[in-house]
Image: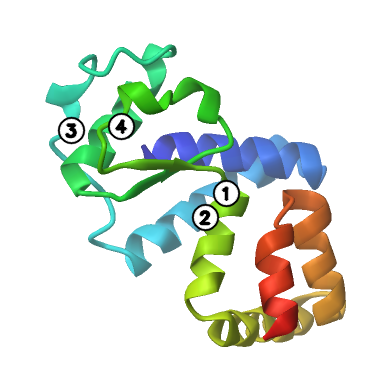
Amino acid sequence: MLQELEYHEAQKLEIRHKLSRANAEERAAYLVERMRRSFGDAEVAGWDGLVGTYGLPDPNDEHIVAAAVVAGAGAIVTSNVRDFPRALIPPHVQVLRPAEFAENTVAVDPLRARFAVNMIVRRYGRKGPAVGVDDFLNALVSNYRMTGAVELIRRA
């Protein structure tokens, strides 16, 4: 499944950031490799046997539910909630939009989320043009509709 992430990340980099296809693919591969190193136990194996058992509208999404079940995940985070009807998903797995997941995560500890945003902005400023916390938070709202998460962070 990381191949799918790598493919979509390369597409995003090519389209949004106007990178060449080769550069986008290289950067996407680097991201996935870093994820593998940082989260070695995050890849799921043994889900293949469950593919085709959920009756999803898009059969190409079956592997996502199968992996979530095998991994014991509590949620599938996707912008494509339409293809994951509640009635077809096992009851212990939620289907959340990214903004909803972000808000739920920030709600657990808004001060820690604020600290994380400050660290991201500081780290980014060392590598590229300086960006303020407000600019970063505004980008989360305008680019990703993370209004709820941003409101919690601003209040923290």
Labels 3 and 2: the sequence-earlier one: 3
Q: Which residue is mark 3?
A: 47
- For mark 2, what is the residue? 101
Label 3, secondary structure: give it: loop
On the image, numbered disc 1 is attached to which residue?
A: 98
N-terminal-most mark, 4 or 2: 4
Comparing 80 with 37, the one in front is: 80
- Residue pointed to by mark 4: 65
Q: Nearer the viewer, mark 4 or mark 2?
A: 2
Q: Is residue 121 visible?
A: no
User: In which quadrant of the rendered view does residue 47 lie?
Assistant: top left
Q: Secondary structure at mark 4?
A: helix
Residue 34 percent location from the top left of the image = 43, 63
Q: Residue 53, percent across and down?
A: 20, 16
Q: Is 17 drawn above or below residue 8 in the view shown?
A: below
Dot label at residue 123: none
Q: Residue at x 68, y 61 (%)?
A: 148
Q: CA distance from mark 1 to mark 3?
A: 23 Å
Mark pair 1, 4: CA separation: 16 Å
Disc 4, disc 3: CB below 8 Å?
no
For residue 59, above or below residue 87: above
Q: Report the side of 49 relative to 99 (left or right).
A: left
Q: Are marks 1 and 4 in contact (CB under 8 Å)?
A: no
Q: Quadrant where the N terminus lies?
A: top left
Q: Find the distance from the CA under tag 4 to the CA under tag 2.
A: 17 Å
**Residue 54, image x, y percentages:** 26, 18
Mark nearer the N terminus (1 vs 3): 3
First in sequence: mark 1 vs mark 4: 4
Relative placement, left or right, of 136 versus 94 is right
- Left or right of 13 in this view: 51: left
The image quadrant where one finds the C terminus is bottom right
